[in-house]
Amino acid sequence: MAWWTLYNQEIDQALLVVEMKKEGRTLYVHETYSWGEVKIQTKDDTPPKIDLKNLSPFNLYDFDWCEDFEGGDYKNQSGVEFKSPQGVSKEEIRALKKAYDADWISGLEQLGWADMGEQQWWLLGPLRLEDEQGNLMGLGDPNKQ
């Protein structure tokens, strides 16, 4: 078994999505980060077959070929957006933003939203793949090192 690390190659292309619920409504908190990494374990020492060009965003939950994975180490949060399929009023969005800024997800829980525990780790744009020792195994954009 081997572990592999995927990174985004372009700034602000790592996304963490946290799903929350309240009174039958769903809220998705989209946190954008400058840099992110996710770790993937395979059954053998063969690198995972991942399209490193990554024209469609990479989400760990879309893949069932890995033995195990670890959510990312995401750095330098650069933005947050709240999305709800049922719609959330502008007033509630302001209250959510204020609570989030004060106490992150705990602030939203204080407003009655429950964290569903289903975090999605997304990497956008071209990817970089490294082995356990940090050796470069592939780049989605060979012009970026």
Image: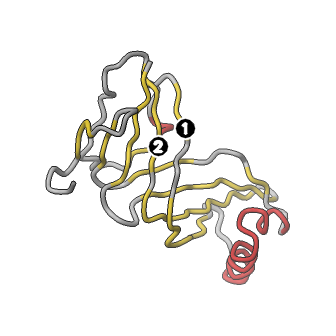
* Helix, strand or loop under label 2: strand
52 or 97, which is in the foreground?
52
Colour scheme: secondary structure
In three-dimensional space, the C-alpha distance between marks 1 and 2, rounded to whole angstroms, equals 6 Å
Taking the image as shown, residue 103 lies to the left or right of residue 141, namely right
127 or 116, which is in the foreground?
127
Name the residue rendered at 79%, 61% in the picture.
113
Name the residue rendered at 82%, 58% in the picture.
23
Taking the image as shown, residue 11 lies to the left or right of residue 94, namely left
- Give, as a three-letter code, the residue at label 1: Glu
Residue under pointer 2: 38
Q: Quadrant of residue 136?
A: top left
Residue 130 at x, y percent in the picture: 33, 38
The label on residue 70 is 1
Residue 103 at x, y percent in the picture: 76, 70
Please report whichever mark, 1 or 2, sits nearer to the chain's N-terminal start: 2
Taking the image as shown, residue 56 lies to the left or right of residue 112, namely left
Residue at the farthest left position: 143
When the figure is inspected, residue 79 is found, relative to residue 74, above or below; the finding is below
